[in-house]
């Protein structure tokens, strides 16, 4: 059989992997993963990402060996390693899955395309989920996405041809220049972990997902926690959607209780969030510089290019003097995960109260999120910073959020033990207590900083031409179910409310 290079990137699975299925149809797949130093040198990369990847690769290798194949791991620039494999195998064809990433991965893929053309290698790229590459009509994107999701997931092959190509040793994180990254409660990589989480969510944990996702106390258990596995392609969105749909059908067939039991809303919510996930990744595919440039042109230059160093350092280390903000940041640093509402609050506080550039704070959060997914991450950074021009700016009040989402103070005290003795009534505002505590004074006046940010954003939105530019953004990026709801005209930015989670939540 003709050898087919199967270049795996963020599609590290056997089931519902169209690239693997295509390679099997063409000949004998040679599965290969290239550990690229250039990727790990990017400022958003972190040791926790690499540790999760390593665990995932080791399980994938075991699964491939169980089918008679193997995972060939190489270390170096993709072009150099793919050329070496071409020479070693004699392969004239290569298959991979399209990757929606930042400018670095786009440039790398262009270099690989040039190599393939120069060496006479036919390279086929299979679509990633419902993401469309090149010119397409956004008006019909949702219909396209629904059609893709309606197809049955592709089964994993029962066996694969043997692979005789040797691997190289997997480099250590230190060898890649990654700084030590202690994350004691990080999720572990691999298919077994992903499958167990999906099963437990659909059968037990997810019952009160919709009601419990907003609080960091309950969200860690109630959310599916599938996001890192989706980001690395351990599971495909279609697999999760299909399993969720099967659970919904089984409940209906079995005469399920009324929607008040929680399951109906929770399963519907997961399906909705899977759709929003694809919607946001499509934005980055359509506009690859979203990690660097404000989506709405009028917002460019809104904040200083260089952040206030003291404010940035305090925010990154969880030492802002605002307890709920600090607790969320410290929790994220130690676990690699945070529920969506608290992610949004961290970004909102950095962008509005501290007036820091979202590009810099976004990089820090990217390094902390085990589930970093560029398409979602950078769109959300812009949305929570008010630079899309089509979403209502949401300036979270961290004191109010702490009282509502952590009413007993358990989460705040766990991550800010300095505040253990502060009375409940003053926990989120310890500066009002007349007893000294070993905790920083707030670096900004929360109410005054929010007021100033609101006035600045409102003034910008009243400028001539703002609405016309917003309409351009809507035409290019907005959901077509109700595009006008994205734009708020002649209204001041509002504070975030509980309903904000409905359309922009990616807890998973």
Image (cartoon, helix red, strand yellow):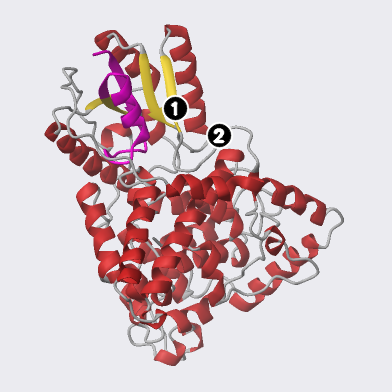
- The answer to whether 292 appears left or right of 332 in the picture is right
Sequence-wise first label, 1 or 2: 1
Q: In the image, 96: left or right of 140?
A: left
Find residue 413 and report its horizontal and vertical position in percent. Answer: 34, 79
Q: Residue at x 47, y 83 (%)?
A: 404
Q: Secondary structure at mark 2?
A: loop
The picture quadrant where one finds residue 447 is bottom right
Where are the magenta residues, as a range? 1-30
Disc 2 residue crowd, few under 14, some 14–19, many 20+, Cα 10 Å: some
Q: Residue at x 38, y 47 (%)?
A: 231
Q: Determine which quarter of the picture holds residue 244.
A: bottom left
Which residue position is annotated with label 1? 125
Left or right: where 207 falls relative to 293: left
Mark number, residue 133: 2
Q: In which quadrant of the rendered image does the C terminus lie?
A: bottom left
Give SS at disc 1. strand
Q: Is residue 269 magenta?
A: no
The disc at residue 483 is none
């Amino acid at each position: 059989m003709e050898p087919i290079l199967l270049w795996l990137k963020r599609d590290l699975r056997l089931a519902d992997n169209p690239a693997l299925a295509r390679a099997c149809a063409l000949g004998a797949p040679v599965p290969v993963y290239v550990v690229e130093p250039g990727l790990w040198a990017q400022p958003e990369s972190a040791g926790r990402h690499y540790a999760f990847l390593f665990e995932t690769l080791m399980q994938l290798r075991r699964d491939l060996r169980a089918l008679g194949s193997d995972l060939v791991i190489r270390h170096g620039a993709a072009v150099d390693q793919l050329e070496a494999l071409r020479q070693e195998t004699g392969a004239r064809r290569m298959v991979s899955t399209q990757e929606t990433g930042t400018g670095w991965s786009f440039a790398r893929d262009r270099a690989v395309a040039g190599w393939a053309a120069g060496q006479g290698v036919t390279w086929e790229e299979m679509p990633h989920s419902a993401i469309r590459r090149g010119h397409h009509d956004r008006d019909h994107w949702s219909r396209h996405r629904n059609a893709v999701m309606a197809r049955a997931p592709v089964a994993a092959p029962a066996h694969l041809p043997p692979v005789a190509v040797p691997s190289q040793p997997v480099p250590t994180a230190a060898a890649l220049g990654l700084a030590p990254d202690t994350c004691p409660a990080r999720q572990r990589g691999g298919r077994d972990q992903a499958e167990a989480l999906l099963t437990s969510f659909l059968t037990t944990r997810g019952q009160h997902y919709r009601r419990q996702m907003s609080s960091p106390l309950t969200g860690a258990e109630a959310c599916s926690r599938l996001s890192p596995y989706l980001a690395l392609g351990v599971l495909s969105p279609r697999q999760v959607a299909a399993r969720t749909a099967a659970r919904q059908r089984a409940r209906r067939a079995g005469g399920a209780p009324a929607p008040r039991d929680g399951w109906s809303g929770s399963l519907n919510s997961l399906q909705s969030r899977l759709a929003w996930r694809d919607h946001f990744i499509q934005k980055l595919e359509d506009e690859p510089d979203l990690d660097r440039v404000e989506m709405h042109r009028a917002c460019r230059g809104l904040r200083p290019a260089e952040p206030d160093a003291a404010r940035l350092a305090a925010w990154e280390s969880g030492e802002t003097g605002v307890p709920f903000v600090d607790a969320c940041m410290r929790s994220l640093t130690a676990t690699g995960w945070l529920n969506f509402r608290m992610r949004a609050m961290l970004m909102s506080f950095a962008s509005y109260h501290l007036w820091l550039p979202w590009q810099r704070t976004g990089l820090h959060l990217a390094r902390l999120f085990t589930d970093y997914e560029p398409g979602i991450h950078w769109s959300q950074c812009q949305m929570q910073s008010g630079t899309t021009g089509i979403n209502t700016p949401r300036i979270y009040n961290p004191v109010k959020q702490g009282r509502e989402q952590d009413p007993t103070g358990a989460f705040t005290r766990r991550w800010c033990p300095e505040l253990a003795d502060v009375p409940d009534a003053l926990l989120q505002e310890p500066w009002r207590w007349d007893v000294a505590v070993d905790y920083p004074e707030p670096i900004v006046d929360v109410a005054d900083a929010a007021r100033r940010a609101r006035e600045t954003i409102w003034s910008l939105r009243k400028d001539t031409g703002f609405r016309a530019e917003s309409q351009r953004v809507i035409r290019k990026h907005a959901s077509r179910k109700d595009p006008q709801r994205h734009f708020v005209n002649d209204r001041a930015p509002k504070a975030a409310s509980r309903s904000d989670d409905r359309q922009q939540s990616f807890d998973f």
